[in-house]
Image: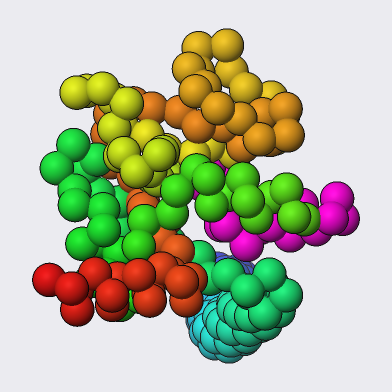
Amino acid sequence: MIDQLLFACELIKMTQSHLLVQLDTKKKMQYNENYQNEKNTQNITNIKKYISYQIEQAVVMMKLVEEIQQNEELLIQKESQVFKEAFENEFKIELKLTKLAYDLSVANYDDVCSKNFGSEFRVAEWADLEDIFYELEESKIDNFIEYLGFNNQQNDFAIKYNGNHKYSQSRFYFVSWHNHKKPDFYLAHENIDNYLLSLGSWVGSKRILCIKKQNEETQENEISIHEE
């Protein structure tokens, strides 16, 4: 009987010990799980903070880039204005381009020029460009092209030829910058310096090139008006 009781006691002890081990294991697992959860939560928090910081830095950088771009644009505009003024002073001319493109079939060129830039402006003639070009030194030719406003995105503007704005009922004059490489399909009525500039004609909408009238032109207009 005593042996049985001793055996029962040992069994109870073993059971208690096993339960304690299991309980301790569960506690450790729970602790590890809680620790891992806290760690993950902290990691997520840190990641969110880092992302927020990067977004803030990106916003700051974007503002800096915008300011730099604006400053560069202002600098380019100032340099362009200084260049234009120097060119105009040197050659005693003033050419302006309309900001908008006009349907060549219906536009009143002279009216467009005077409304955009004042009554002292008229439509530029092909002869005006010839007169200016042939007075230029070779070193000034690129400056002249830049002054006119030609670039890879904008290479033709509406003008007149011998007082006419159209070649035929359906073709209207304009000047194109070909840089000596006129396309085969292009019908050139005249050209300057082996197709540096070409006089073409076609349909469509284009910006109009205007020129400030010379003193003698203004005086002629005044005399004509007075006589009438």
- In the current view of this chain or complex, which residue is farthest to the front? 227
State yes or no: residue 45 in magenta: no
Q: Is residue 35 visible?
A: no
Q: Is residue 122 visible?
A: yes
In the picture, measured across the screen, residue 54 lies left or right of residue 41, that is: right
Q: Is residue 129 above or below residue 221?
A: above
| Residue at (26, 58) in percent of width and height | 110
| Residue at (73, 48) in percent of width and height | 134
Q: Is residue 5 above or below residue 74?
A: above
- In the current view of this chain or complex, which residue is farthest to the top? 184
* Number of numbered discs overlaid on the protein picture: 0
Residue 161 x, y percent position in the rendering: 41, 38
In the picture, measured across the screen, residue 107 lies left or right of residue 156, that is: left
Residue 129 x, y percent position in the rendering: 58, 49
Residue 78 x, y percent position in the rendering: 63, 84
Given residues 122 and 172, the one toward you in this image is 122
| Residue at (32, 26) in percent of width and height | 167
Chain part drawn in magenta: 137-155
Q: How is the image coloured?
A: rainbow
Where residue 28 sits, quadrant-wise, is: bottom right
Where residue 137 sits, quadrant-wise, is: bottom right
Residue 227 x, y percent position in the rendering: 18, 73
Task: Quarter of the image for the C terminus: give it.
Answer: bottom left
Q: Is residue 66 above or below residue 132?
A: below
Given residues 18 and 228, the one toward you in this image is 228
